[in-house]
Image (tube, rainbow, N blue to C red):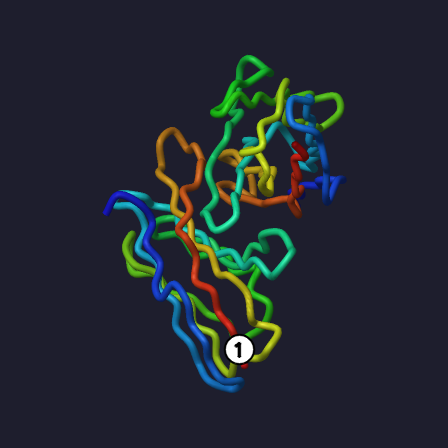
Amino acid sequence: AQSVTQPDIHITVSEGASLELRCNYSYGATPYLFWYVQSPGQGLQLLLKYFSGDTLVQGIKGFEAEFKRSQSSFNLRKPSVHWSDAAEYFCAVGGRPGGTSYGKLTFGQGTILTVHP
Amino acid sequence: GAGVSQSPSNKVTEKGKDVELRCDPISGHTALYWYRQRLGQGLEFLIYFQGNSAPDKSGLPSDRFSAERTGESVSTLTIQRTQQEDSAVYLCASSPRQGARTEAFFGQGTRLTVV
């Protein structure tokens, strides 16, 4: 069964500092990988996604993520955090065609990001 | 509509009552998901519909929970004999079948409070 682990429940950074949110997954092959953001009072919004090809993917709001097959990781990064980035971030895994979990999206527990001025 | 629509946005119900939550997916989206998000917790998978295939019900927490979807349209999630631990935000998402990509688009959720 596919699963996602986000080891950090809560991260605090200063505005302007760099950010890395960790995500590790368990899947029989290379899954589809996603990062979503949930701002207070808002719905979930897709930040970026990885399906295949270049392992470094760019997303909205200046975020990027790198797929590392050897580490089963898909960490989210941003070089300089803005106060408006304070939110909860979810990593998700999607099953590829032909697998038993095809189409199923599994989310991690989320990481809450607090940004200090 | 332009996005995934869920109704009601808020529901307060008495313990023991049944509730129905509704989800209107994006037109043309074949996949539909229900998730539960308890306060301060992550998204808990409940059920997944993909076209005319049998739904994946592996996440439903008990037989009090059920969901239906007719074709590729509206879905309803029913919780019978509600309990206080059912209090949560119930999120619905839909996704297109474009080369089997599984990017999901989420609704705003239904906040259920069982008193």
Who is closer to the viewer here, A79 or B27?
A79
Chain ID at mark 1: B
Tag count in the figure?
1
Q: Quadrant of the C terminus of chain B?
A: bottom right
Dot 1: within a 10 Å radius of its alpha carbon, few (fewer than 14), some, or many (20 or more) residues?
Answer: some
Which residue corresponds to the image point at 57% horizontal and 21% vertical from the top-left?
A64
* Picture coordinates of residue A99, whole percent (x, y): 55, 38
Q: Where does residue A117 sit, x and y in percent of width and height? A: 65, 32
Residue at point 65%, 27% (across, down): A15
Q: Residue furthest front?
A: A117
Rendering coords of residue B65 (x, y %): 50, 71
Residue A65, located in which quarter of the rendered image?
Answer: top right
Amino acid bearing label 1:
Val
Position above or below: B87 against A31: below
Element at badge 1? strand
Left or right: residue A43 compared with residue B3: right
- Identify the residue at image location x=68%, y=35%: A116
Q: Position of residue B70 (x, y in %)?
A: 29, 60
Q: Determine the image quadrant of residue B96.
A: top left
Residue on which the image places disc 1: B114
- In this orientation, which residue lies closer to the viewer: A64 or B98? A64
When the figure is inspected, residue B4 is found, relative to residue B89, above or below; the finding is: above
Q: Is residue A30 left or right of residue B23?
A: right
* Residue nearest the observer in this picture, A14 or A85: A14
At x 32%, y 54%, the residue is B5
